[in-house]
Amino acid sequence: MQNDNPDLDGPQNRFDTVHGRFADRILIGFGVGCLIAVPSSLSRAFYTGWLPIYTLHFFLGVVLLGCALFRDRLTTQVKVLIPIFITLMAGASGLLQFGLAGNGISWLLLSGILIAVAYGRQAAGAYTVVLIVSVAGLGWATLTGDITLDLDADIYVRSLPAWINAAIGTLVFGLIAVSAIGLMYDELHVTVALLDSQKKEIEQLANSDSLTGLASPRLIKNFLRQLLLHIKRYRGQIGLLYIDLDGFKPINDQYGHESGDYVLQQVAQRITRCVRETDIVGRLGGDEFIVILTKLDNDAQMEELAKRILDEFSLPFTFQNNDIPVGCSIGLANSHHYKDIAEKPIEQIVDGFIAQADEAMYVAKRSGKNCYSMAKLDQSVAEP
């Protein structure tokens, strides 16, 4: 069955989708931010004179704006790398040009956040180590006088453009960081919800028959396992009806597979109408069905149910104005008749219980079909 929801195609597709959304949002954020940040940065030239960093900022702003406008032509990998490269360049140049008086550290930290979100903890950890070593080296070189600033820091920090630039830089930094982390947080919740939905779908497919909606063989065995464990501890009895359709195979050849599916669905409904709410109806596959009587007092209850089911099959199934006669052979088994049920391993008891009902069903077929047969009394559970 093909899935039309791209978010459910698989983990890798889901990751690629989230990665692409992240890249677009960050690139757009930087594109909008540079319209404010670049003019703010250039305005400082009135106090500091034209510095090489302003040329770099202007160039980086043009690159960012162009990439944001034409992002549809870029691969996701390029869209992720460009903001990381820009923040690295802006941060490193700002730290060298303005020292701690500028926003260099903030941009370098933003670069680390982008790396962490885009490439994971190990890449961010490696970047953090390099950043700490680089900043420590720059700090030592500044303290020893090996590196000097090209401006009077005291005059610079007292200028209005410096504070406006700091405020704008902090605002842009904050918005982009919050946008990146918020996106991943939102996508994490969506991914968890999708995984939970997929898990439920998988469980539904594993526990129910897709055609009839009845319990699957796996679920039937799980029910039997729990019921038989309860019997081994607390005594009691349960019943099992193994139902195999008579005359079903020619239906597909004569009327087509659609008719066969229709008959199987109708069979499921007719059997379900016959049982109690506490009983369990399942399909073992093909034209074989099974009923578990979870509360059983005696064999007569199973026989009464078998008769009701046979009565339901006395009427033909109508498909496209065609009356299709279908009968069934039923094998009955009662857990109370197994003298060694308390001694066997539970998996062997489950398989043996089903096998005994199956064997009784074949006895019914050999007896002329369209009837039921009870498994022999005091018969040991068959070895698997």
Image (cartoon, helix red, strand yellow):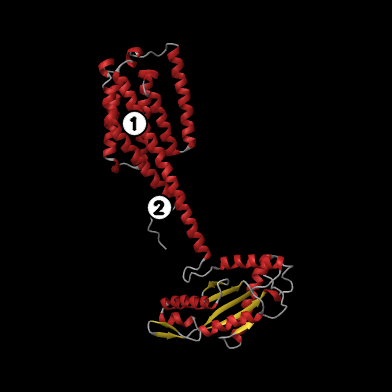
Q: Is residue 335 left or right of residue 33?
A: right
Please state which amino acid type lies under the numbered disc 2.
Asp
Q: Above or below — where is 68 with respect to 139?
A: below
The quarter holding residue 40 reads top left
Give neighbour class at mark 2: few <14, some 14-19, many 20+ (Cα, 10 Å). some
Q: Which residue is mark 2?
A: 7
**x and y percent of residue 73 in the render?**
29, 43
Front position in the image: 145 or 268: 268
* Furthest residue toward bottom: 368
The residue most toward the top is: 145
Q: Earlier in the sequence, mark 1 or mark 2?
A: 2
Q: Is residue 65 left or right of residue 270?
A: left
Relative height, residue 141 to residue 324 (above, below): above
| x, y percent for residue 12 | 43, 49
Name the quadrant of the C terminus. Answer: bottom right
Evaluate whether residue 86 shows in this view: no
Q: Position of residue 254 (x, y in %)?
A: 42, 83
- Specify the label residue 254 is tagged with: none
Q: CA distance from mark 1 to mark 2?
A: 31 Å
Work out whether residue 147 or residue 104 is closer to the camera in this orientation and state it. Answer: 104
Question: Image height check: is 98 above or below 358?
Answer: above
Image-quadrant location for residue 110 = top left
Q: Amino acid at mark 1?
A: Val
Label 1: which secondary element = helix
Which residue is drawn at the image coordinates 45% and 23% (left, top)? 134
Q: Give yes or no for contact between labels 1 and 2 (Cβ–Cβ under 8 Å).
A: no
Q: Quadrant of the N terminus?
A: bottom left
Relative side of 305 to 3, left or right: right
Q: Secondary structure at mark 2?
A: helix
Q: Nearer the viewer, residue 133 or 354?
A: 354
Residue that badge 1 annotates: 172
Residue 41 position within the rendered picture, expressed as x and y whole percent measured from the top left: 29, 23
